[in-house]
Amino acid sequence: MAKVCIFLITVALIAGMAGCGGDGGVEYDLTINSTAGGAVTTPGEGTFTYDEGTVVNLTAEAEWGYEFANWTGDMGTIADVNNATTTITMDDDYFIAAKFAVEPQYILIITSTEGGEVTKPGEGIFSYDEGTVVDLVATPDDGYRFANWTGDVGTIADVNAAATAITMNGDYFITANFAQYFPMVATDSWMDILLQTTN
């Protein structure tokens, strides 16, 4: 009888340990997806299971022409909902999505006055993503010099430099201005010149 009791106690203890969970942890599901314009590359998209308290790395990557906007859904434990690279702490079942938006583009119109041309990026109408830094190079013709840039020059690094750059934070119209170049020539005094012409 004593052996039977010991056996039953042993079975009860094993069953009790198994009932507590072999790894002793609670698990939660994290479901991830994204809008058009990009994807979640870490840990990926789909449903993943993690132990309670796990800190999961999140990385969202935008496609060309798009930018990461923010994380949506169950965002309560996301460290930074506005950062494409962040973390989420698994304290429950969560559903999150990476939201992407079309990256703004702006128009740059470039012209020049007589006496030269804009050789980089050229003259005409160009389209750039927001924040793009565009190199500008103005080249004068013989007998002319570069004067300055005029127009929407608020983000031009140096309006007086023929080689400079503009940052595209809006639609801009700019002009490269050139002026005739008169080289300094070593001459006699005006009186000497006058005397020479009268003789």
Image: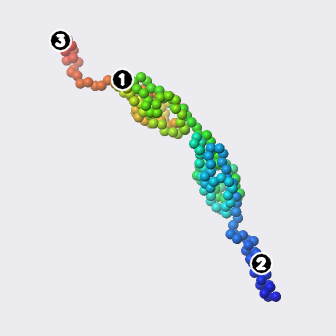
Q: Which mark is residue 165?
A: none
Judge from the rendering whether residue 79 lies leftward or rightward of residue 176; answer left or right. right
How many neighbours does mark 3 have within 10 angstroms: few (below 14), some (14-19), or many (20 or more)?
A: few
Judge from the rendering whether residue 164 lies leftward or rightward of residue 187; answer left or right. right
User: In the rendered image, which quarter is residue 50 located in?
Assistant: bottom right
- SS at circle 2: helix
Above or below, 42 against 192 in this view is below
Q: Position of residue 13 (x, y in %)?
A: 75, 78
- Residue corresponding to mark 3: 199
Locate the C terminus by quadrant.
Answer: top left
Q: Which mark is residue 12?
A: 2
Q: Are marks 3 and 1 in contact (CB under 8 Å)?
A: no
Q: N-terminal of the two: label 2 or label 1?
A: 2
Return the residue nearer the eye: 106 or 80.
106
Mark pair 3, 1: CA separation: 33 Å
Mark pair 3, 2: CA separation: 133 Å
Q: Is residue 159 visible?
A: no
Locate the N terminus by quadrant.
Answer: bottom right
- SS at circle 3: loop
The number of numbered discs placed on residues in the rendered structure image is 3
Return the residue nearer the eye: 76 or 97.
97
- SS at circle 1: strand
- Residue corresponding to mark 1: 180
Judge from the rendering whether residue 95 lies leftward or rightward of residue 121; answer left or right. right
| Residue drawn 62% across the image and 42% down it | 101
Q: Amino acid at mark 2?
A: Ala
Q: Is residue 50 visible?
A: yes
| Residue drawn 47% across the image and 29% down it | 123
Above or below, 172 against 26 in this view is above
Q: Amino acid at mark 3?
A: Asn
3 vs 2, front mark: 2
